[in-house]
Amino acid sequence: MPILLAATALRSQEASGSSEYLIKAGFIYNFANLVQWPSSSFAQSDSPIVIVILGEDHFGNTLDRALDGKKVNSRPFVIKRARTVTELQRTLGPQKDCQILYVSSSEMPHLGEAIQMLKGVPVLTIGETPGFAKDGGIINLILEDNKVRFEVNVRAAKDADLNISSRLLALARIVQSPEGRKPE
């Protein structure tokens, strides 16, 4: 009997984990609709919005399915994955072709390296770890009372030359990098 209960609990935990990432996939889509990149971010008017997941991929194929066939300003989505910052550098290539970088909790220790690599490149960084936005990330998805909420570091967005809609900012908790310290 205990084995059956453990298996049921595990399935329940997996289901809640997958629903969390389905919700996060919806947030990513909405963020793409409410953030404006400079026109120079795209090679052509119909170039895709490239999302790179850095680190352990908790989405599985949830993000791919959620964004399949969807477009923002006639731009489809392309999703790439990089397990490490070194792999991220190869994935981005010399043009640093990426509009959204989702930093998994497994790569939080390397956040500074990733942000430094993208310095001066208009990339929306999204994370899921406490302190992500304060440490220079732009949007941090957090779980509070079993709900996904988000924080925005407006200064990091400005430094990345991204314009975040006031509608999005009205729903966010605004955070800042510690005084006297610019995000790395």
Image (cartoon, rainbow, N blue to C red):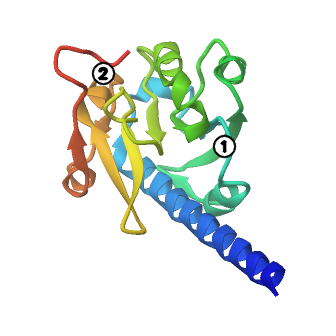
- In the rendered view of the protein, which quadrant contains the C terminus? top left
Answer whether residue 70 is visible to the viewer in this image.
yes
Residue at 50 percent of width and 25 percent of height: 111
Residue at 46 percent of width and 40 percent of height: 126
Left or right: where 153 falls relative to 87:
left
Task: Give the tally of numbered discs.
Answer: 2
- In the rendered view of the protein, which quadrant contains the N terminus? bottom right
Residue at 72 percent of width and 22 percent of height: 87
Of 143 and 87, the residue lying toward us? 143
Mark 1 surroundings: few (<14), some (14-19) or many (≥20) residues within 10 A: some
Residue at 66 percent of width and 76 percent of height: 12
| x then y, percent, for residue 137 | 39, 31
Q: Is residue 7 above or below residue 20?
A: below
Distance, label 1 to label 2, CA atoms, is 24 Å
Which circle marks residue 38 in the picture?
Answer: none
Q: Secondary structure at mark 1?
A: strand
| x then y, percent, for residue 60 | 72, 54
Three-letter code, disc 1: Val
Disc number lying in front (1 or 2): 2
Left or right: where 153 falls relative to 104:
left
| x then y, percent, for residue 3 | 83, 79
Q: Which residue in the structure is indicated by mark 1? A: 78
Three-letter code, disc 2: Asp
Q: Secondary structure at mark 2?
A: helix
Answer whether residue 104 is visible to the viewer in this image.
no
Q: Extreme bottom residue here? A: 1
Q: Which residue in the structure is indicated by mark 2? A: 159
Left or right: where 30 falls relative to 86:
left
Of 8 and 1, the residue lying toward us? 1
Which badge, 1 or 2, comes first in the chain's sequence?
1
Q: Is residue 159 above or below residue 27?
A: above
Mark 2 surroundings: few (<14), some (14-19) or many (≥20) residues within 10 A: some
